Amino acid sequence: MPDDRGVPHATGPSGLTPVPAHRARVAALLTPAPVESRPLADCLGLALAEDLVAAIPLPPFDNSAMDGYAVRSVDVTGASPEQPVVLPVAEDLPAGRVDSPPLLPGTAHRIMTGAQVPSGADAIVPVERTDGGTAEVRVHASAQPGVDVRRAGEDVRVGTAVLAAGTTLGPTQLGIAAAVGAARLPVRRPVRVLVLSTGSELVEPGSPLRTGQIYESNGLMLATAVREAGGRAELLRFVPDDVASFHAALAPHLDETDLIITSGGVSAGAYEVVKDSLSGNGVEFTKVAMQPGMPQGAGRYRGGPAVVTLPGNPVSAMVSFEVFVRPALRAAAGHRQAERPGRKATLTSSLEGPPGKRQYRRALYDPATDEVTPHGGPGSHLLSAMATANCLLEVPEETVELPAGSTVDVLLMD
């Protein structure tokens, strides 16, 4: 049955929803985030919304690549330690001097790295090849025309797109934006995510545990995963297993939320508060042909924010986030690279997969050999192996056994 965005809830021969169909369903729920103009310092990790075109060249003028002396190369022809050329020093040119007196034949200007090369000069003699004089300089080496002169525009020409739309803005990208004179950039606003942690058995880490209680970890894990992916996360913890409390907890956040992520409460047992609360409120639940992470849900809460419900076991929750939520979240935020990098790798030991389900195993990928080794067991509660793995190894649905030496797909997590 299609949801309210017209995305069919396709099922395979087993009655389970194929992984690609659920990925498409989740992706369709998130529309592109709006564009904002932000100061450069507030753009780290965001996606550029439009090409950044250089209005000035880089370098903006011919400048010196060395501390030394601006000269005419013809004036220092044949200079050597045994027969230095002596030139009067007519000017001092520190970086930042806004005037640049021309160089007259038979003279030198002392010049610092980054200072504008004066007209008349066609080479820089590094200070190490001179006696460092200030009134006159003894030049101990000749210089070829153009040596140690950075030409205007040799890095970037006016009109060049220095950053493409969809670029994730890191330190070097923000550096080039500043270098071409941009004070602000058009970026996609981060997707606003509310992470809901439900369960009457959950307590805050650091508190004493009573019998039957566990420390809450999924909410923190998912909220930080959202932030790492470039989203803005708010964590709402310790919502009781009660339908009325669930709706009351959501109500104050709906106007400022693009996506609600829950974990747990979506299986077939009693006290499944997420499923009980969201069924009939725009969210459909399904079983996806994958391991771990079979019970899933997606839709729109009462026609408003997108909702993705994840399983409660920690590995299931994290694998589901990586497979379904992270790429959709990054695509909505405008990142050109929405997917984790993938690799083909050689399996070091045999693996068995559940028939009809796509399995995601925690694993260790060695980039030096392009080999991958399963890490920890397949259990969805075994979080320690997830914390030390650097990739997810994908076992296809139709595969019952993969012998050692097989070529497999891995999803890099680092």
Image (cartoon, helix red, strand yellow):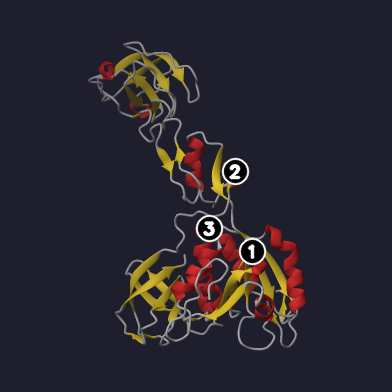
Amino acid found under the numbered disc labelled 2: Arg
- Cα–Cα gap, marks 1 and 2: 25 Å
Residue linked to disc 2: 38
Q: In this image, 300 relative to 126: left or right?
A: right
Q: How many marks?
A: 3
- Residue at screen point 39% across, 27% down: 64
Residue 208 on image: x %, y % = 75, 80
**For the residues carrying marks 3 and 1, which lies nearer the camera in this image?**
1
Mark 3 or mark 1, which has the lower sequence index? 1
Q: Which mark is residue 14?
A: none
Tell which of 119 and 85 is nearer to you.
119
Find residue 342 and report its horizontal and vertical position in percent: 39, 66
* Callout 3 secondary element: helix
Q: Which mark is residue 305?
A: 1
Under mark 3, the amino acid is Ala
Q: Give the distance between the C-alpha atoms of the residues marked 3 and 2, in whole angstroms.
A: 18 Å
Structural crowding at the residue carrying mark 2, measured as other residues with C-alpha within 10 Å and reported as few (<14), some (14–19) or many (≥20): some
Up-down relation of residue 29 to residue 263 (above or below): above
* Residue at image location 45% in from the left, 18% down from the top: 92
Report which residue position mark 3 lands on. Answer: 332
Q: Is residue 319 left or right of residue 342?
A: right
Question: Which comes sooner in the sequence, label 1 or label 2?
Answer: 2
Which x, y percent locates residue 151?
35, 28
| Marks 3,2: beta carbons within 8 A | no
* Front-lying residue, 240 or 19: 19
Drawn side of residue 198 relative to residue 181, left or right: right
Residue count near mark 3 (Cα–Cα under 10 Å), binned few <14, some 14–19, many ≥20: many
**Number of the front mark, 1 or 2:** 1
**Foreground residue among 58 and 31:** 31
